[in-house]
Image (tube, grey):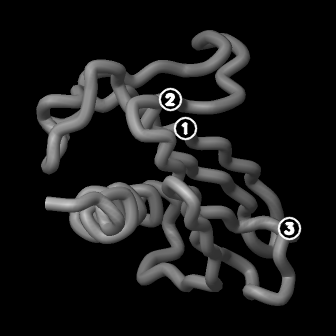
Amino acid sequence: MPQISLVEYVPDDIEAKQLRASFDPVRLDPPTGPDSPELTVKWYRQDPHDWFRVNYTDPNTGFHAGWHQDEDHPALGRAHFQYSAADEENRWGITFEHETPSLILWEMVDELLEDVRPTYQYANEES
């Protein structure tokens, strides 16, 4: 994925409680910057369904988007998407095409780059 410039375990390779990917701000479309947006992944293996929190944050704009599969919003179902941008925030239930963790993660990253950033991060900006 050419937009990502660094991937690391947090806090380190041994504990590896989460995964953090840094985006090159000029490789994103539209570009952002100067600071690198980050995607953090926390995954909890359990039965019958894994829990996870995948969060994207752009420190340049304050935009946040998250895909969560947990018990925080039971009225929305097992998984939900949420975002906050400027004076707006929203969340709704979602389902995934895949069940394999790596494929779910790819699904989220594709959605982030193709739909979420263009639709929600820049929706209120004037051209």
- Tag 2 near tag 1, CB within 8 Å: yes
Quadrant in which residue 120 is drawn: bottom left
Q: For label 2, count other residues whose C-alpha is less than 10 Å away and answer few (under 14), some (14-19) or many (20+).
A: some
Q: In which quarter of the image is residue 106?
A: bottom left
Q: Is mark 2 on a helix, strand or loop?
A: strand
Determine the residue positioned at 32% across, 68% down: 123
Q: Which residue is drawn at 47% across and 48% down?
A: 63
Is any atom of residue 65 visible in this view?
Answer: no
Residue that numbered label 3 is attached to: 72
Residue at which label 1 appears: 40
Horizontal and vertical percent for residue 94? 57, 83
Residue 68: give x, y in percent of width and height: 66, 63
Mark 1 residue crowding within 10 angstroms, few (<14) / some (14–19) / many (20+): many
Q: Which of these two is toward me, 56 or 125?
A: 125
Q: Between marks 2 and 3, how big is the CA–CA gap?
A: 22 Å
**Residue 109 in the figure: left or right of residue 65:** left
Question: Which residue bears the numbered disc 2?
Answer: 20
Foreground tag (2 vs 3) = 3
Instruction: Evaluate whether residue 10 shows in this view.
Output: yes
Disc 3 residue type? Asp
